[in-house]
Amino acid sequence: MTTLAAELRQRIAAQGPITVADYMAASNAAYYRRDDVFGANGDFVTAPDISQAFGELIGLWTAVTWQAMGAPYPFRLIECGPGRGTLMRDLLRATAKIAGFHAAADIHLVEASPYLRSCQAWALGDREATWHGTIDSLPAGPAIVIANEFLDALPIRQFEKHADGWRERKIGLGPDGYFVFVAAARSDVPDADGLAADVGAVFEICEPARAWAAALGRRLARDGGAALVVDYGHRTSAVGDTLQAVRRHGYHPIFRSPGEADLTAHVDFAAVAAAAHATGAVCHGPVEQGLWLRRLGIQVRQTQLTAGKSEVVAREISAGIRRLIEPDGMGMLFKVLALGHPSLASLEGFAQDGGP
Ligand code: SAH
């Protein structure tokens, strides 16, 4: 049993069942402090580590957006949950020749894990950055915000449909003293009203993701700029139990090792967009990741990256890019949503999709 599992069991024994959000928050806070999460030898690999083209194209998107904002000097270049810092490193390399961009970019990274902060500092080399535990301490001003696979790690609450209505799914202890789901008292779940839901169906709400989108939407509408959210999830709110644990590149039972597996849930893009829209931001997309990367020119980048390489290396580069864009890889499940100041009428990669 993990140390955290023992702590959570004590907590439940003393205070009663906890929410799925409590469990997920405690597990991920412990998990992301570890030094062996990312990469081939870790638990999972993300897009920036699959192909450098990912961070480079997001870099170009950032530079074009900055120009559309009127090239403000300075502007806050913010990344939430930067992991090992690969995306920001590739973004900065790809934008090095854009006149004035690097001089104007004031980098702020939102990262809870001390270990990952040190990886990010290393990835950035000489570039200065300021770290924040949450978005609350970010300085005001025009901003471009990037969040890749950040919202899926934020804690969700789950509600289960019973014959008499919705009940929150909580986590208690079974007769053997181990974790089990228990149903709390009946509660109203207005967001689930109108959704087709059979008895047993699960509806998820990620309150921190909504709060994040609302706070950023308010700030972007006030100070200018845009945010780019890339994650896996669904376009419209729907029922479905999407809570999952991943360890060593495979699915893992969610109750087995809290703090030692990555707990995530699909992002409800409709809920995120609605929260940002309500505070004055304009939403673009979501667009499927494969389509968005193609519109940004990933195939041209593939040709450049493979030119002059040995066949083996070229094949590896192409395989990475295919994984990002193909429907059976990350191309369809992953989606890209932008939030922006109303003056940014169209944003690169979204033009044909209109507003929310
Ligand atoms: N964007 C990176 C990492 C994704 S993993 C990539 O694509 O590779 C999620 C990241 O969010 C990690 O850096 C993790 O430490 C951070 N994170 C998770 N929950 C957080 C929270 N509540 N506050 C701040 N950072 C958080």
Image (cartoon, rainbow, N blue to C red):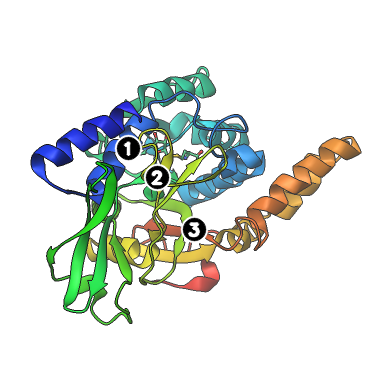
State the residue at coordinates (50%, 60%).
Answer: 335
Lower position in the chain sequence, tag 2 or tag 1: 1
Answer few, some or many: residues within 10 Å of disc 3's Cα (few below 14, many 20 plus, some between 14 and 19): many
- In depth, the one of 164 and 316 nearer the eye is 164
Three-letter residue code for mark 2: Leu
Find residue 167 and report its horizontal and vertical position in percent: 18, 66
Lower position in the chain sequence, tag 3 or tag 2: 2
Q: Is mark 1 within 8 Å of ligand 1?
A: no
Q: Quadrant of the N terminus?
A: top left
Tell me the number on the disc at residue 336: 3
Splitting the image into 4 quarters, where does residue 270 fall?
Answer: bottom left
Lower position in the chain sequence, tag 3 or tag 1: 1
Q: Quadrant of the C terminus?
A: bottom left
Q: Nearer the viewer, mark 3 or mark 1?
A: 1
SS label for mark 1: helix
Answer few, some or many: residues within 10 Å of disc 1's Cα (few below 14, many 20 plus, some between 14 and 19): many
Answer few, some or many: residues within 10 Å of disc 2's Cα (few below 14, many 20 plus, some between 14 and 19): many
Could you tell me if the residues under marks 3 and 2 are in contact, i.e. CB atoms within 8 Å? no
- The CA span between labels 3 and 1 is 27 Å
- In depth, the one of 26 and 104 nearer the eye is 26
Tell me the number on the disc at residue 27: 1
Find residue 165 and report its horizontal and vertical position in percent: 18, 76
Which residue lies under the disc numbered 2? Answer: 263
Whether residue 133 is visible = no
- In depth, the one of 202 and 8 nearer the eye is 8
